[in-house]
Image (cartoon, rainbow, N blue to C red):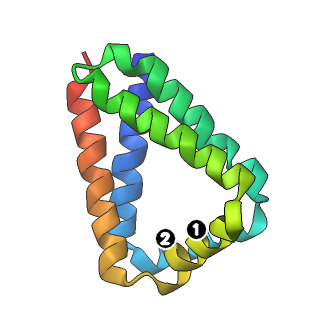
């Protein structure tokens, strides 16, 4: 499962870098992705990634961190799937429309930090 940790690390680093450098373009790509795809289909991806993070945590030096990320991803997938009180639409509206460019870049910095940390912790 090391391959998954390498893949997710590079994906986080790449996505974070693109959201910092090309803020408007990456926001437009995310808008198109989330508007075209059904939320129930999208809810499967964080759940699968969470399960894979939980399973691959034993190949990391700090497995507790990956297990926490995995549990949070599974919970996110479940919440998106059941969509209590129209939470998904409100969250997507906030993330895609009302979020400032600085906050969007900050999330990119956080993704780079998490991706680099996971990459450096692979044993």
Residue at 28% from the left image edge and 56% from the top image edge:
110
Q: Tag count in the figure?
A: 2
Label pair 2/1, CB-CB below 8 angstroms: yes
- Could you tell me which quadrant the C terminus lies in? top left
Secondary structure under tag 2 reads helix
Q: Is residue 6 in view?
A: no
Residue 11, picture quadrant: top left
The residue tagged 1 is 30
Residue at 62% from the left image edge and 73% from the top image edge:
31
Residue at 68% from the left image edge and 48% from the top image edge:
43
Horizontal arrangement in the rendering, residue 38 relative to residue 85 (left or right): right
The residue tagged 2 is 26
Horizontal arrangement in the rendering, residue 59 relative to residue 90 (left or right): left
Residue at 26% from the left image edge and 61% from the top image edge:
109
Indicate the position of residue 57 as horizontal and vertical percent values.
37, 20
Q: 55 above or below 68?
A: above
Residue 96, picture quadrant: bottom right
């Amino acid at each position: 499962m090391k391959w998954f940790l390498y893949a997710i690390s590079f994906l986080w680093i790449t996505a974070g870098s693109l959201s910092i450098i090309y803020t408007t373009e990456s926001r437009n790509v995310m808008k198109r992705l989330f508007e075209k795809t059904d939320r129930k289909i999208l809810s499967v991806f964080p759940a699968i990634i969470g399960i894979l993070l939980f399973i691959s945590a034993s190949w990391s030096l700090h497995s507790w961190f990956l297990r926490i990320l995995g549990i949070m991803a599974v919970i996110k997938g479940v919440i998106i799937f059941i969509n209590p009180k129209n939470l998904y639409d409100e969250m997507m509206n906030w993330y895609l429309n009302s979020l400032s460019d600085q906050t969007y870049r900050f999330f990119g910095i956080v993704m780079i930090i998490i991706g680099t940390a996971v990459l450096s912790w692979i044993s």
